[in-house]
């Protein structure tokens, strides 16, 4: 990934690649995931978990996705990017990295499954909805 621009904030960065893709991540750990506002990139991610209503508020507040809150899931391996969706409408609420392969979930009743990297209303989300940042990003991607 060759960044065209990087907007740093408190513990995260929003990166615009030369290909025009926007990623959010933790630079110190070299972890980057697509931003939730990029519908095409989010739709292309194979790993998915659907969480119950009780888990939604925790995930949107930055918590990792825990096994008890997961209602459904697709196949994924440890380290894969995973989209977290709420169960009522199937809307993406977070993007993270799998901490274990999905095949282990059937035998689990507790524990963290997905590390939450980017979620609704986090710093990256707010930055991407800031008018000045939007103008800067739109100039870079053209």
Image (cartoon, rainbow, N blue to C red):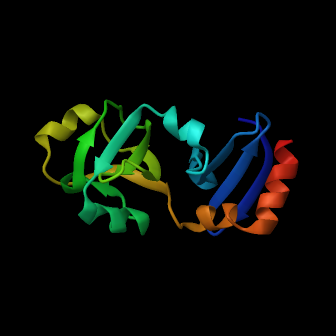
Q: Is residue 62 left or right of residue 71?
A: right
Who's the residue at 35% across and 31% down the image?
77
Instruction: Quadrant for the C terminus, please.
Output: top right
Quadrant in which residue 18 is drawn: top right
Spot occupied by residue 108 in the image (x, y as percentages of width and height): 14, 45
Who's the residue at 75% across and 59% down the image?
7
Spot occupied by residue 82 in the image (x, y as percentages of width and height): 42, 41
Q: Along the line of sight, which residue is nearer the eye, 131 or 70?
A: 131
State whether residue 115 appears in this view. yes
Q: Along the line of sight, which residue is nearer the eye, 4 or 48?
A: 48
Who's the residue at 24% across and 42% down the image?
72
Who's the residue at 42% across and 69% down the image?
61
State whether residue 11 appears in this view. no
Spot occupied by residue 98 in the image (x, y as percentages of width and height): 38, 42
Residue ranking furthest to the front: 89
Q: Is residue 125 left or right of residue 136?
A: left
Quadrant in which residue 100 is drawn: top left
Spot occupied by residue 126 in the image (x, y as percentages of width and height): 63, 67
Q: Is residue 51 left or right of residue 130?
A: left
Q: Along the line of sight, which residue is nearer the eye, 81 or 83?
A: 83
**How many marks do you count on the picture?**
0
Instruction: Quadrant for the N terminus, please.
Output: top right
């Amino acid at each position: 990934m060759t960044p065209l621009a990087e907007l740093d904030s408190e513990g995260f960065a929003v990166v615009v690649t030369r290909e025009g893709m926007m990623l959010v991540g933790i630079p110190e750990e070299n972890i980057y995931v697509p931003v939730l506002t990029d519908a095409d990139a989010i739709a292309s991610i194979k790993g998915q978990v659907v969480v119950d209503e009780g888990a939604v508020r925790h995930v949107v507040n930055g918590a990792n996705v825990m096994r008890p809150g997961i209602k459904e899931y697709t196949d994924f391996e440890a380290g894969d990017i995973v989209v977290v969706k709420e169960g009522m409408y199937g809307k993406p609420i977070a993007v993270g990295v799998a901490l274990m392969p999905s095949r282990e979930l059937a035998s689990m009743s507790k524990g963290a499954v997905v590390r939450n990297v980017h979620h609704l209303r986090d710093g990256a989300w707010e930055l991407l909805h800031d008018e000045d940042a939007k103008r800067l990003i739109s100039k870079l991607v053209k």
